[in-house]
Amino acid sequence: MAEAIEGLQAEFNRILSPLRQEGNPSVPRQLHNVSEARLYQRELGLIQTQLRSFKANINHAKKQTHLMFDHAQTNANNHPFVAAFAGKKKANHLRAQEKQRLRAREQMAVRPYELLAQEVDAAILRLDQMKLDIDKAIQGGQIR
């Protein structure tokens, strides 16, 4: 699973690399005229589209992880020997412990995906803000 997260993190960095090459991604590059500004807004929109698609991949990986643990929880219900030799109460107790342990492992496995999804959301919002700042600069006459 760690390899999957590292691969997703590398993909995230690749998508944002055009912005990082320009220096600080929160400050738009120097725009000299309106057509250049509009082109840059379209580029930012394309990056946002890539990020949204990427987030869908993250959600898919998260769902796969949930499914894997759902299957494991289903298998945790099978304690026929314990029920036969130690009684129902002990079998129920073991079943509950196993499910609790699996839930904790599931939360630990899903957490990196959730953190990466939050990073993607934050990047999309930053790009929206950059596009709005460009619009304000055009309308304010700072870019001609």
Image (spheres, rainbow, N blue to C red):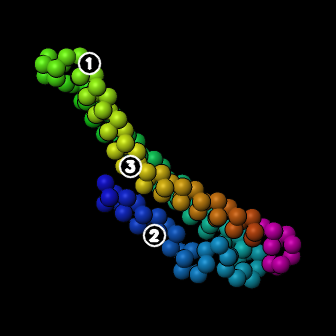
- Residue found at x 50% / y 73%: 17
- Residue found at x 25% / y 28%: 94
Task: Please determine whether, in this image, residue 74 is positioned above or below residue 39.
Answer: above
Q: Nearer the viewer, mark 2 or mark 3?
A: 3
* Residue 53 in view in this figure: no
Query: Which sits in the foreground, 106 or 40?
Result: 106
Q: Position of residue 137 (x, y in %)?
A: 80, 73
Q: Circle 2 is placed at which residue position?
A: 14
Task: Determine if the magenta segment contains residue 141.
Answer: yes
Q: Amino acid at mark 1?
A: Lys
* Residue 45 in view in this figure: yes
Task: Determine if the magenta segment contains residue 88.
Answer: no
Judge the density around disc 2: few (<14), some (14-19), many (≥20) Cα neighbours within 10 Å.
few
Q: Position of residue 12 (x, y in %)?
A: 47, 64
Disc 3 to disc 1: CB gap under 8 Å: no
User: Magenta segment range?
Assistant: 135-144
Q: Position of residue 32 (x, y in %)?
A: 74, 83
Judge the density around disc 1: few (<14), some (14-19), many (≥20) Cα neighbours within 10 Å.
few
Disc 2 to disc 1: CB gap under 8 Å: no
- Residue found at x 45% / y 69%: 14
Task: State left or right for residue 85 relative to residue 137.
Answer: left
Q: Amino acid at mark 2?
A: Arg
Figure quadrant of the N terminus: bottom left
Q: Amino acid at mark 3?
A: Met
Quadrant of residue 41 within the rendered picture: bottom right
The residue sitting at the right extreme is 140
Task: Please determine whether, in this image, residue 37 is positioned above or below residue 51.
Answer: below
Q: Nearer the viewer, mark 2 or mark 1?
A: 1
Q: Circle 1 is placed at which residue position?
A: 89
Q: Circle 3 is placed at which residue position?
A: 108
